[in-house]
Amino acid sequence: MSAAAKVLVAERIGESGIDLLRDAGFEVDLGADWDREQLAERIGAYDAILIRSATQLDADLLERATNLRAIGRAGVGIDNVDVPEATKRGIIVANAPQSNVVTAAEHTMALLLALARNVPQAHASLVAGRWDRSKYSGVELLDKTLGILGFGRIGQLVAERAMGFGMKVVAYDPYVGAERYRELGVQKAETSDDVYAVADFITVHLPKTPETEGWLNAEAFAKMKDGVRVLNVARGPLIVDADLQAALDSGKVAGAALDVFRSEPITEHPLFGYPNVVVTPHLGASTAEATDRAGFQAAEQVVAALTGGSVTTAVNVPSVPAEDLEVLGPFLPLCRRLGRLAATLAAGTIDRIEVEYLGRIAERDCRPLTTAVLLGVLAGHTEEDVNEVNAPSIAAERGIVTAETTRTSARDFTELVRVTVVSGDRTTRVVGTTLGRRHRPHLLEAWGQRFNLQLDDHLALFRYEDVPGMIGRVGTMFGAHGVNIDAAAVGYEPDDGEGTDLGSQAVMVVTTHDPVPAALIDEIVASDGFVAGHAVDLV
């Protein structure tokens, strides 16, 4: 009989997780009081380790973990794990991404009620010996409109709870299918401006990316209703603090509730003394139940990893099988780039993603390629990190339907990948392949016209009236902004009847060494003869 697998619980987790590991027949050691030196000396004896946020599993420690097969992170973030090094060593890394969603949603509701009824201010006044009953009269939630920016797991839970108070809910998130809004009885906003126009309360549940940082700024506050109340239980950098302060000073914003801040921990902040601002020290995930749930879910993943089960929250996956690597491997970067490009050009709510594989790749299991497409579509647009394991489930949770078809023959090229994004009654299709010994990704079709242009890290696309001089104007304006064009191509109509009839319009694609500034795109599109333009970063 083989010896029981050994599991180290390196930080304090709930007893339910420890009991689960022991009930599975593992030998469990508790090492929450070990220092790094002790951990380095002993880690080689364990088949799995459970951690929270304090333990740093870097390359040096993983090199000593000669028997390690699984890492369980009792929480969401995995910044303290060297995932590439773990993957290289064949170690499965899994987290507990759903452990705190209920807690975060409930804390949002707690702040919403506190903000509406001035609960913290009234409490402080009373315990200070004052009976300021009239001073702290609040507002009801009934029939008020709650605007939600970011409609992922947490945003959807907030919506359900707010509707229980009789609130109307409008949400903005183009990466959630229209059917999901209908299922929940939530009004779908086409733009964030549509939310600002009607919301009495606004709560943000967006990921932190370069695009979302500072999302609520002076321009956004100016578009909101007078007397709006704003909440942030997501990420501090989503709000420009100085702009919020100015909006509070002017009375445009009647109140704010903040659980997160640009830098943490923080005890001095310009808004901490404001009578209409409620603050908490990042308590969104801080409940006994969430801590216990995180430990239990991480333990579940460790049990699955050590017993051959399905590790549903793994953040890394084994490489493509050796027999498929030669065929499928070069298409993974292409598929991710096509997904990103298609989603950008769709510029609307994504209801369905259709992926078609033609040629030799269609003879293989193309699911890893479809997952790569989903990564391109979703990465940076969801509140949770998207990876090769969870991308299909995150898409499904957001009501995005994924369809995959294969055909073993391809016209003109040995292999083709077609990605179509369906947004209501509109479809956006891009087509690509790989060429040459280095399998360089190439764009073959976009906006209904065909090209043959290498898909580099940065590109811009323009639709314009097909008249002389347009190409030169683009080059001149790029030069004026100091952006060097590496390559360019003008599209032509497909001869198979599958293109989009643009009439007298043409499409141009340019690739650049550096990202294309949004101001440059806006300037070109605003000039005579140009219809639309997009800059896309594919890195």
Image (cartoon, helix red, strand yellow):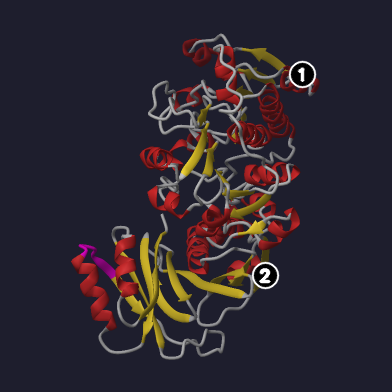
Q: What residue is disc 1 on?
A: 19
Q: Position of residue 403 (x, y in %)?
A: 68, 65
* Callout 1 touching callout 2 (CB < 8 Å): no
Q: What amino acid is at disc 2?
A: Thr
Q: Position of residue 81 (x, y in %)?
A: 51, 30
User: Which quadrant holds residue 306?
Assistant: top right
Helix, strand or loop status at disc 1: helix
Determine which of the numbered discs, if any, sits on residue 521 in the image. none
Helix, strand or loop status at disc 2: strand
Q: Nearer the viewer, residue 383 or 140?
A: 140
The vertical placement of 172 against 94, above or below, is below
For residue 360, side relative to residue 492 (left or right): right
For residue 273, side relative to residue 229 (left or right): left
Q: What amino acid is at disc 1?
A: Asp
Q: Nearer the viewer, residue 218 or 535?
A: 218
User: Which quadrant holds residue 291?
Assistant: top right
Q: What residue is disc 2 on?
A: 405
Q: Who's the residue at 72% across and 19% down the image?
A: 18
